[in-house]
Amino acid sequence: MAKLRVLVVEDSLTVRKHIAATLSADPGIEVVGEAEDGRQAIELCLARRPDVITMDMMLPVMSGLAATEYIMAHCPTPILVVSSSINRGELFKTYDALAAGAVDVFDKGGAAEPDGAWERNLVSATKLVAKIRVITHPRGRLMSLDRPPRPSPATPSGAARPKRRREVVAIGASTGGPAAIVEVLRGLPASFNLPVLFVLHINEPFGMAFADWLDGQTPRRVALAKDGDSVASAAGRVVMAPAGHHLVVCDRRLRLTGDPERHSCRPSIDVLFESVAHEYGSGAAAGLLTGMGKDGAAGLLEIRKAGGLTIAQDEATSVIYGMPHEAVLLGAADRILPLGEIGPELAAESSEARR
């Protein structure tokens, strides 16, 4: 069996050699190149065509973000961002890289741990990212804030769905989620005035500033949920579950809980969706976006059973067709749509329902 071919990009010689040695120690991995700056990373990617790249963000000559944007536009390759996330600026660059097509992020800060867990996790993360199908991903397609929304597609099959008054939208995403949620939010018109409740699976410490980053990607305001706030007070805004807490709706108020993980996740999409189904019934709309595993599928089904609108992202536009596929298998999705049509569909459904 052919070995997994890895390109290691890291400006620190000590860290680069440690990453390379860790990966090379696995019999199924071959390190085919090491780069100390972003320009060298591009050159080695084009010359050696690795199966996966581990990419630092803070690089000389050309940043890891710029290298990621170029590679995903001209030589699409699965990229695992390996970052120490020590400051807000680096965190924002990490989110930008994920939006530009990098698959996942791994914390470089645990490399000094003595028990070997960091090394084992790095090998596992690299192998997992290498399995992800990536596509040409020009960064420019995410940069326009003023493009008109696409027309909403016709409801597939048979009779038209009866229109109901929507009161809230809930969205969940995991791997590939940073780019996906940006596109969905940019597909909502300025007049869209429903609260949007959002859960994203992103490992700590990388989740701490994501809401602030997302707030800068669209004209729609984004903030972390605050326990006790009314859902209605978030009209027209996006409220995001903070890391380490489930976000639920109870008596039309946002609640943050430390209840046990669901599907090894806290926050869990299922937990949010189930509470929204219970509180809003047919007044809810929900979208389940790209991601690994099955979190959100059962909750999406609960919303559909309650009469709400449910949308799953389609396979062709998903970075990982895991969670949406599980929803489809359960019969939880009213509609299975390409990513670019989900925002306009939510807007069309809500505006038509309010006429």
Image (cartoon, grey):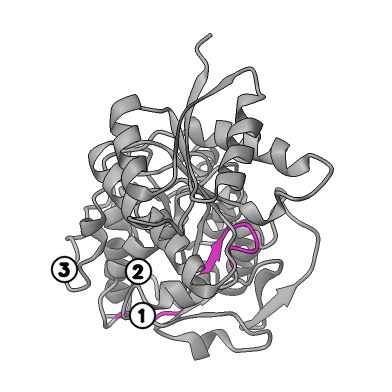
Magenta-drawn stretch, dominant element (helix, strand or loop) = loop
Picture quadrant where residue 214 is located: bottom left
**Amino acid type assigned to the residue bearing label 2 in the image:** Leu
Q: Is residue 186 left or right of residue 14?
A: left
Q: Tell me what residue is drawn at x 61 percent, y 74 percent.
A: 279
Q: Is residue 58 left or right of residue 208?
A: left
Picture quadrant where residue 254 is located: bottom right
Q: First in sequence: mark 3 or mark 1?
A: 3
Q: First in sequence: mark 2 or mark 1?
A: 2
Q: Helix, strand or loop at disc 1?
A: loop
| Mark sitting on residue 185 | 2
Q: Residues within 10 Å of mark 1 (few under 14, many from 20)?
A: some
Q: Tell me what residue is drawn at x 56 percent, y 72 percent.
A: 87
Q: Which residues are magenta?
A: 192-207
Picture quadrant where residue 341 is located: bottom left
Q: Residues within 10 Å of mark 2 (few under 14, many from 20)?
A: many
Number of numbered discs? 3
Q: Are marks 3 and 1 in contact (CB under 8 Å)?
A: no
Q: Is residue 170 above or below residue 129?
A: below
Q: Helix, strand or loop at disc 3?
A: loop
Q: Is residue 151 above or below residue 211?
A: above
Which one is in front, 119 or 330? 119
Classify the position of the C terminus by image quarter: bottom left
Q: Is residue 39 above or below residue 231?
A: above
| Residue bearing the label numbered 3 | 147
Q: Are marks 2 and 1 in contact (CB under 8 Å)?
A: yes
Q: Tell me what residue is drawn at x 51 percent, y 91 percent.
A: 233
**Amino acid type assigned to the residue bearing label 1 in the image:** Arg
Q: First in sequence: mark 3 or mark 2?
A: 3
| Residue bearing the label numbered 1 | 220
